[in-house]
Image: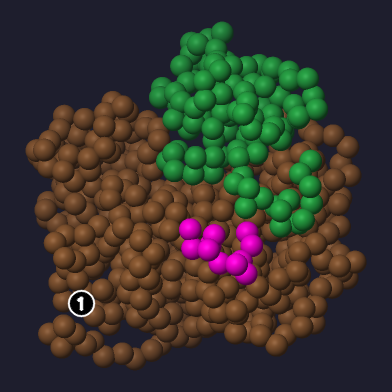
């Protein structure tokens, strides 16, 4: 049997990384197909991005990529893959300017791009699109470029369930046509995984629904390795109360970039400075891991807000300044009954980003020939804690590189679809179609809620061996409970069927986070062990995970180091 | 009905079916959205309910458009009070199932990629 679709490069996931990868693959001569289980450019994390993109374009004040690299490595608490981090910082300005050429509309001031300070940066470095519109502007700009490429096809509503590997090389992928529930065979000489991170595994998250760890599970099952899975970033000041609709829970970050604001406990006192980082009212500089930890400690000490977080206050800022900085957003807040001149809102940590991910080299290639990753799916560049503003930069840079190198890779390779290699993946979809009726009941959608509660409680910001052990036991039970095949079927808009494939991925990835967290018997960056509160210099290595039968093999590997010289900023002009 | 629940009448069925309205009760929380209620129904009562959404609360993905009391709204920004409401799919788009309609832009359709006619 032949494949339903034949292409050179298949890109899985259509956020910024996937769209950039597809554009780059196509312009480097590869016939390219871009797919997403949601709609093109609408799902994933990109569309949710509120504001900052870090890049040393040096328009606001003198800057050089080596300074961006220094700040990235400092934030990463010693664990960054320095080669990936260097690529990210060196190429970010190129991508920012390319997006500018594509008319993204970066905010400007006078005759230059406006750049703001963000936590962990030593220079005003972050570009953005007003007002809180960076993500939608990125998505729209890349989608327009995609529409202009003639060797690039794209489709939404296709859930990729397996990468197909024959004789050690990628030959394509299998997925579910969401509209019909039928399997789809895609022959591809290279596959780029750009389906984002895993923050949907946590109860409090800022994720789109398709961010349940698909990239990582697809990579593992294809034979690739993951790295640093224990490092989940919690964004410290996610919205907590009162209930808002139509607003991203991360929205207070931009408010702090532009206006400062005060983070207060229930005694009306600023407290972050008590946890090892001096933060003054008019400067928003404390790193994310420090602030998250500080809020939890205040709550534990009985100084939290009524809903269990901290207060964020802009009361001291004149209304006119609020409006200049955020224009229509102030009206959207008013519709939600929030008047920032009258009182603080409540915030607390929320799962936001995954530092770990697919292990790749600087070409974005995994150890499996033909398999690449891009964007948040990639692990290692940000070490134990991501510097703010680096997520979109890495989506652009890693996306472009994955597309370019995959296009190079497939030149001269024959297409080699193998029905035999795809048989298992096709069978499990067919099996689901043979389930007689749709089951009424909570199903796996209910199990996801249980998993999210468990991950939040036991594998969240503060971890102990006991919590991790019980979490692992329950996740393993759940892996058995879901069975070997989907137990529900709904052929037209196959959501229950997709739930099973999602849950298989999410449970597999939850287990890799837990095992990594058990093995890392120290506290470092986003990984905080209550039973090991100090950083252990002897654990300055990465943990690499691969599938091993039904379980996982997890081993320490040496850091990837790269020497660089900090270019003096006078000379960088 | 207790003070703490909300009722929704939700249209079920595919394009060939006579639409039926199924009634669901959900726990009511102050400020909750219609989408919150639909997600709760899938997780607690009936996971076979077909809904389309992605960003969940930010109103950026624009995927969750439905009809509430006959009016086109985003389910994520439509507040749910304690009065019963009727929720149905968009009527100017092809129905796939329950509340899901075909809102995929023409050049981004899987049917086009697969070279098949739309059903």
Query: Does the segment drawn in magenta span residue A137?
Result: no
Where does the magenta region start and end?
A144-154
Q: Residue at x 67, y 22 (%)?
A: B11
Q: Where is residue A256 in the image (x, y as percent from the top left)?
A: 22, 50
Q: Is A414 left, or right, of B45 in this rendering?
A: right
A427 in relation to A178, above or below? below
Q: In which quarter of the image is the N terminus of chain B?
A: top right
What chain is tagged by disc 1? A
Residue designated by label 1: A63
Colour style of the rendered protein structure = by chain
A493 in relation to A462, above or below? above
User: Pointer 1: residues within 10 angstroms few (<14), some, or many (20+)?
Assistant: many
Q: Where is residue A73 in the image (x, y as percent from the top left)?
A: 33, 76
Q: Quadrant of residue A8?
A: bottom right
Query: Does the segment drawn in magenta span residue A152?
Result: yes
Q: Is mark 1 on a helix, strand or loop?
A: loop
Name the foreground residue: A533 vs A133. Answer: A133
Write down which chain is painted green.
B
**Does residue A462 appear in this view?**
no
A26 in relation to B57, above or below? below
Q: Where is residue A371 in the image (x, y as percent from the top left)?
A: 64, 76
Q: Which residue is drawn at 58% across and 73% down?
A: A26
Q: Position of residue A240 (x, y in %)?
A: 35, 38
What color was chain A assigned in the picture? brown
Q: Residue at x 63, y 84 (%)?
A: A409
A214 in relation to A406, above or below? above
Name the foreground residue: A376 vs A190. Answer: A190
Q: Is A467 left, or right, of A95 in this rendering?
A: right
**Does residue A66 appear in this view?**
yes
Name the foreground residue: A284 vs A531. Answer: A284
Q: Quadrant of the C terminus of chain B?
A: top right
């Amino acid at each position: 049997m032949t494949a339903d679709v034949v292409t050179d490069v298949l890109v899985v996931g259509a956020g910024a990384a996937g769209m950039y990868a597809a554009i780059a693959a196509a312009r480097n001569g590869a016939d390219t197909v871009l797919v997403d289980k949601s709609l093109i450019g609408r799902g994933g994390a990109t569309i949710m991005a509120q504001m900052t993109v870090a890049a040393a374009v040096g328009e606001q004040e003198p800057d050089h990529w080596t300074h961006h690299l220094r700040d990235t490595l400092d934030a990463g608490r010693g664990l960054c893959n320095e080669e990936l981090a260097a690529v990210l910082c060196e190429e970010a300005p190129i991508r920012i300017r390319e997006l500018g050429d594509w008319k993204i509309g970066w905010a400007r001031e006078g005759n230059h791009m406006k750049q703001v300070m963000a936590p962990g940066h030593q220079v005003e470095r972050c570009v953005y699109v007003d007002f809180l519109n960076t993500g939608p502007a990125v998505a729209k700009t890349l989608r327009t470029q995609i529409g202009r490429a003639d060797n690039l096809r794209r489709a939404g509503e296709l859930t990729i369930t397996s990468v197909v590997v024959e004789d050690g090389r990628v030959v394509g992928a299998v997925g579910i046509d969401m509209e019909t529930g039928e399997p789809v065979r895609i022959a591809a000489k290279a596959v780029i995984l750009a389906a984002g991170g895993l923050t949907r595994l946590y109860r409090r998250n800022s994720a789109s629904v398709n961010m349940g760890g698909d990239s990582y599970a697809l990579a593992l099952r294809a034979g690739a390795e993951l790295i640093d899975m224990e490092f989940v970033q919690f964004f410290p000041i996610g919205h907590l109360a009162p209930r808002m609709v139509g607003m991203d829970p991360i929205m207070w970050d931009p408010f702090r970039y532009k206006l400062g604001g005060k983070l207060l406990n229930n005694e009306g006192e600023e407290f972050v400075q008590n946890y090892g980082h001096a933060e003054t009212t008019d400067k928003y500089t404390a790193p994310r891991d420090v602030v998250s930890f500080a809020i939890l400690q205040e709550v534990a000490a009985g100084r939290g807000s009524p809903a269990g977080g901290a207060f964020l206050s802009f009361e001291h800022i004149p209304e006119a300044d609020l409006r200049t900085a955020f224009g229509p957003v102030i009206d959207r807040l008013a519709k939600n009954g929030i008047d920032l001149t009258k009182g603080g809102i409540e915030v607390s940590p929320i799962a936001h980003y995954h530092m770990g991910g697919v292990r790749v080299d600087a070409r974005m290639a995994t150890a499996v020939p033909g398999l690449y990753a891009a964007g948040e799916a990639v692990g290692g560049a940000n070490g134990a804690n991501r510097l703010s503003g680096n997520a979109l930069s890495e989506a652009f840079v890693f996306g472009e590189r994955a597309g370019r190198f995959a296009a190079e890779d497939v030149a001269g390779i024959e297409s080699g679809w193998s029905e035999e290699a795809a048989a298992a993946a096709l069978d499990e979809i067919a099996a689901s179609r043979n389930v007689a009726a749709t089951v009424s009941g909570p199903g796996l959608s209910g199990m996801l809620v249980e998993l999210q509660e468990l991950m939040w409680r036991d594998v969240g910001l503060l971890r102990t061996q006991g919590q991790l052990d019980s979490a692992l036991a329950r996740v393993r039970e759940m892996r058995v409970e879901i069975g070997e095949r989907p137990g529900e079927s709904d052929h037209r808009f196959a959501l229950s069927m997709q739930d099973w494939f999602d849950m298989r991925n999410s449970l597999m990835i939850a287990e890799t986070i837990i095992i990594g967290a058990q093995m890392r018997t120290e506290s470092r960056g986003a990984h905080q062990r209550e039973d090991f509160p100090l950083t252990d210099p002897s654990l300055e290595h990465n943990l690499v995970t691969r599938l091993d039968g039904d379980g996982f093999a997890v081993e320490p590997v040496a850091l990837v180091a790269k020497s660089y010289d900090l270019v003096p900023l006078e000379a960088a002009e | 009905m207790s003070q703490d629940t909300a009722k929704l009448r939700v249209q079920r069925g595919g394009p060939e079916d006579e639409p039926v309205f199924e009634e669901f009760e959900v726990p009511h929380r102050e400020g909750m959205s219609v989408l919150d209620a639909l997600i709760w129904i899938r997780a607690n009562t009936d996971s076979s309910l077909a809904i389309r959404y992605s960003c969940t609360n930010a109103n950026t993905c624009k995927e969750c458009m439905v009809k509430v009391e006959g009016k086109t709204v985003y389910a994520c920004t439509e507040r749910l009070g304690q009065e019963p409401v009727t929720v149905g799919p968009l009527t100017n788009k092809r129905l796939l199932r329950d509340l899901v309609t075909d809102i995929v832009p023409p050049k981004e359709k899987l049917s086009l990629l697969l070279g098949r006619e739309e059903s």
